[in-house]
Image: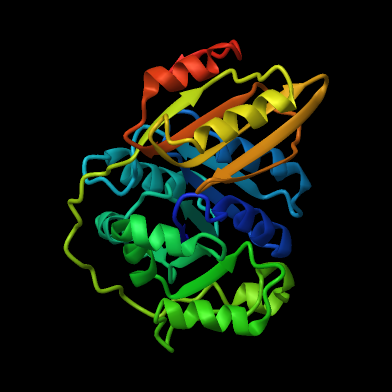
């Protein structure tokens, strides 16, 4: 079993990238999904996409009781060994929380590696629209994710030309030895997807990072705005700063028989259609959250709130 770590800061688009990768390749994947909050959003989306992926060899395991990059999280190592001993897939794709440190994840994996378990070169997804904000405000996460990457893929870049990609590469001072495709992954050929599955050798394990996370989250389930206008009002309220510095919010909900998905990243948001889910869910992530005020903001939506 080969382990492929796909990291990226909050809202970079890791889950969408994994969905596209699984659809493009005929490989057997197990996905280990780590949410920062205690309810799963991305795991639900991956499970819904499973039936659309051929071949249907896609299993999803979730760890939501803390970041897998924390040394105190013993579930991560034991889960990896259990997956290897029971399912034994060709590939285990690890999608860490957006506020994870790949250095610590690689250190943790060193403890469980043996002849049947290896680690491929890590991939980092960066948000082509918001990477400067992530780098400026959350450099401890962003830089570690960049420093550990052997492949860096720019998301939200469908309309970019080659010079746009080169500008980002130069701004980030990406080493020439790092694979940095100058196109959006929707334009990857099968060969280019396969080229992401490289193994250059033993990683140089660095000292574990002990930075205390500044991030907080509040989760809502079930989440049921009365209508789309009400959702827009909530998202606009998140922009006011009254509830703390909110960098990320995401979720899905049902209204009048239709399901919708929303993504909020660094004051910008999009709302689109969603597959039918079991129940509506929402997560708000940021720094210095006023959870009482957020609870009041969402209370009219008849949501059961986890603090």
The residue at the point 28 percent across, 58 percent down is: 140
Q: Which residue is drawn at 30% across and 73% down?
A: 203
Q: Which of 119 and 139 is in front in this view?
A: 139
Counting labels gives: 0
Task: Tell me what residue is drawn at x 35 percent, y 55 percent.
Answer: 137
Name the residue at 33% across, 66% down. Answer: 143
Q: Is residue 18 above or below residue 115?
A: above
Quadrant for the C terminus in the image: top left
State left or right for residue 154 relative to residue 72: right
Q: Where is residue 240 drawn, in percent x and y?
A: 48, 35
Vertical comparison of 86 with 112: above or below: above
Q: Which residue is situated farthest in the bottom direction here?
A: 176
Query: Is residue 140 at all visible to an observer of this figure?
Result: yes
Q: Coloring scheme of the render?
A: rainbow
Q: Is residue 117 visible?
A: no
The percent position of residue 163, horizontal first and vertical second, equals 61, 84
Q: Quadrant of residue 128?
A: bottom right
Q: Residue furthest right?
A: 257
Q: Choose between 54 and 207: the one closer to the eye.
A: 207
Residue 303: image quadrant is: top right
Image coordinates for residue 164, horizontal then vertical, percent: 60, 79
Residue 130 image position (x, y, % from top left) = 51, 59
């Amino acid at each position: 079993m080969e382990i492929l770590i796909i990291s990226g800061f909050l809202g970079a688009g890791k889950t969408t990238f994994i969905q596209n990768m699984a659809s493009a390749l005929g490989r057997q994947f197990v996905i280990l999904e780590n949410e920062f909050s205690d309810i799963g959003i991305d795991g639900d989306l991956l499970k819904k996409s499973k039936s659309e992926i051929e071949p249907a060899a896609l299993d999803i395991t979730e760890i939501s009781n803390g970041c897998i990059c924390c040394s105190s999280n013993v579930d991560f190592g034991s889960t990896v060994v259990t997956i290897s001993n029971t399912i034994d897939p060709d590939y285990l794709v690890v999608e860490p929380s957006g506020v994870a440190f790949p250095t610590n994840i690689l250190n943790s994996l060193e403890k469980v590696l043996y002849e049947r378990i290896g680690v491929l070169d890590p991939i980092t997804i960066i948000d082509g629209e918001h990477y400067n904000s992530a780098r400026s405000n959350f450099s401890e996460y962003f830089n570690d994710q960049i420093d550990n990457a052997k492949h860096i893929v720019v998301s939200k870049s469908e309309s970019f030309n080659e010079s746009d990609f080169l500008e980002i590469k130069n701004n980030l001072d990406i080493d020439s030895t790092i694979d940095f495709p100058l196109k959006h992954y929707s334009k990857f050929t099968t060969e280019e997807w396969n080229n992401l599955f490289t193994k250059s050798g033993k990683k140089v394990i660095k000292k574990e990072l002990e930075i205390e996370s500044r991030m907080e989250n509040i989760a809502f389930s079930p989440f049921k705005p009365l209508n789309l206008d009400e959702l827009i009002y909530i998202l606009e309220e998140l922009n006011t700063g009254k509830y703390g510095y909110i960098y990320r919010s995401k979720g899905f909900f049902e209204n009048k028989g239709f399901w919708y998905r929303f993504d909020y990243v660094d004051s910008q948001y999009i709302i689109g259609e969603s597959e039918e889910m079991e129940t509506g869910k929402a997560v708000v992530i940021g720094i210095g959250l006023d959870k009482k005020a957020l609870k009041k903001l969402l209370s009219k939506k008849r949501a059961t709130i986890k603090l």
